[in-house]
Amino acid sequence: MDPKSRWEQERQEAKQQREISIIEAAERVFVKKGLDKATMRDIAAEDNVGIATVFRYFPKKDRIVVAVASRIIDMEAEAFKSISEQSEIGIKKIEMLFDHFIADTSSAYLNRNKLIEAFESYAAQQAEPLDGIEDYHEATRKVYRIFKKIIQNCIDDGSIRSDIPVHETLATLVNALGIFSKKLSLQSNIVMFEADPDMIVQLTIVKNIFLEYLKPH
């Protein structure tokens, strides 16, 4: 590689790293202050850069809000992709998806759940589509494309029952457990009843019911 090309490559890599750093800083600020109250100045301070730098990468606050939400969905796509590439039968991959929703109870994962919930509400309240919202939509489509491959695995290897509409059923069950997991994580700091089962216990019960329903008879 000639010196000019190497310099250009290094410059582009530095720009990408700076953009990622700003997005990560914005995520931390949004967790602490919320989407509405957070400012571009807060994000700049969190990333130890000038506010002009933040605006150079993200001319509007909406752009960085969408970028943070898209990054979270991209991380979910990577988790789905990792499961899809396992050398397992289809129903085992579905079980692994269920376990993915159940297993991660880290504060980072819970905070991202809260951010996506807040983002969906924030986006719905805008009079016009958010600037850059297509990036978020593409990220969600990526997750679904990977999920469709897992569904096809189930059909091809016959590891789930064939007397049900496979695509619709699997999409419904995975969505249901994912949403239930998200709701429980959002309520994890609210004690409703002292006798409430632990969140993991509840999710595991639902997972086992779903898996039993899917088994071939």
Image (tube, helix red, strand yellow):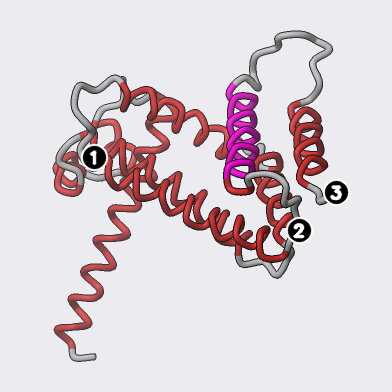
Label at residue 217:
3
Callout 2 secondary element: loop
What whole-number distance in Å separates the C-alpha atoms at marks 1 and 2?
43 Å
Q: Mark 1 points at which residue?
A: 63
Q: Give the amino acid at mark 2.
A: Ser
Q: Distance between the residues labelled 1 and 3?
A: 50 Å
- Residue kind at label 1, given as amino acid type: Arg
Question: In this figure, which residue is indicated by the disc labeled 2?
Answer: 159
Q: In this view, does 193 lie to the left or right of 114?
A: right
Camera-nearest residue between 200 and 87? 87
| Residue drawn at x 34%, y 44% as measured from the top left | 137
Q: Residue furthest bottom?
A: 2
Residue mark closest to the camera, 1 vs 3: 3
Residue 25, picture quadrant: top left
Specify which label sits upstream in the sequence, 3 or 2.
2
Residue 59, picture quadrant: top left
SS at badge 1: helix
Q: Quadrant of residue 199?
A: top right
How many residues crowd around disc 1 within 10 Å: few (fewer than 14), some, or many (20 or more)?
Answer: some
Q: Residue at x 22, y 82 (%)?
A: 6
Residue stretch in magenta: 168-186
Tag shown at residue 74 = none
Quarter holding the N terminus is: bottom left
- Which is more N-terminal, label 2 or label 1? 1
Q: Is-magenta flag for residue 37?
A: no
How far across and how far down the image is residue 92, in percent?
75, 56
Magenta span main SS: helix
Given this view, does label 1 or label 2 mark the residue nearer the observer?
A: 2
